[in-house]
Amino acid sequence: MKVIISDTHFLSRTGLEFILNKHFNEVELLISTIEGYKVLSQQIKHFDPEIVLLDYISTNISSEELLKLMLRYPQVRFILITEWLPKVELMKYFQIGIKWHLLKECDEIEIKECIEYALNNQSFFCNKLIQFIHSQNSEVSKEMRTNADCNGILITNREREIIQLIAEGKSNKEIAEVLNISVHTVLTHRKNIMKKTHANNTAGLVLFALKNNIIIPTNHFLFAENG
């Protein structure tokens, strides 16, 4: 597995390198401490990594530049790891369609799990970030930093499919028929999805999915509540 760690902070780089070597076999690492879009783009082009662990603040990579990288290198999984930021700044990165985002305070197991899910192309977000985005606060509060659960939120490919069908107004029965699964399985998935995303209803779930680019927008959404 080839990985670029793009971070100007020594302790962060050292910690990520330790986690990769401890939990994954045959890791080939490129450590990048140089700021800027052009340098990172060149490194990705020449090194051809599967994963880039990116602190976009310390390396000065804007959301627009990250989107360019994502479009230019669609085979690369960009896992974002950064400090707390104001919501307006975080949302710039969520809105371009990122699938993996952690905080530097996330623990070893959560970072390991995020990398594993990235390798399987399944979304994974720090739960604290999701709770913050759902909150009414523009700045993270001391209470949220200390009390919020930091277990990661992963959205599996199957859950992504179900959220998309929910957004299209499909009933539970119709979703079951499309995916060739039982209605009971659909209901179980819906319950798990609502719990993961902290959504109170279907409309809230769809808005969350749209905001975080989990689903593809269509011309209209019916917000079907029941099946």
Image (cartoon, rainbow, N blue to C red):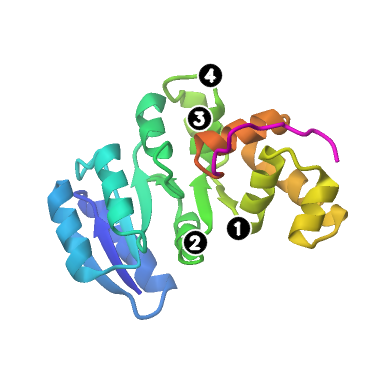
Q: Read off the residue under disc 1.
A: 157
The image shows residue 158 at horizontal and vertical percentages of: 66, 57
Using the rendered view, name the quadrant where residue 87 is placed: top left
Which amino acid type corresponds to the residue marked 4 in the rendered image? Gln
Judge left or right: residue 202 versus residue 86. Answer: right
**Part of the protein shown in magenta:** 216-227
Quadrant holding the C terminus: top right
Q: Residue drawn 52% across and 25% down?
A: 143
Q: Secondary structure at mark 3?
A: helix
Using the rendered view, name the quadrant where residue 16 is placed: bottom left
- Tell me whether the residue at label 2 lies in contact with that at label 4, contact meaning CB atoms closer than 8 angstroms: no
In the depicted view, which residue is nearer to us: 6 or 77?
77
Give me the C-alpha separation between circle 3 and circle 2. 23 Å
Q: Earlier in the sequence, mark 2 or mark 4?
A: 2
Numbered circle sitting on residue 121: 2
Q: Secondary structure at mark 1?
A: helix
Q: Is residue 164 visible?
A: yes
Using the rendered view, name the quadrant where residue 77 is placed: bottom left
Which amino acid type corresponds to the residue marked 1 in the rendered image? Asn
The image shows residue 33 at horizontal and vertical percentages of: 15, 54
State which mark lies toward you, 3 or 2. Answer: 2
- Tell me whether the residue at label 3 lies in contact with that at label 4, contact meaning CB atoms closer than 8 angstroms: no
Q: Is residue 34 visible?
A: no
Q: Residues within 10 Å of mark 2 (few under 14, many from 20)?
A: some
Q: Read off the residue under disc 4.
A: 136
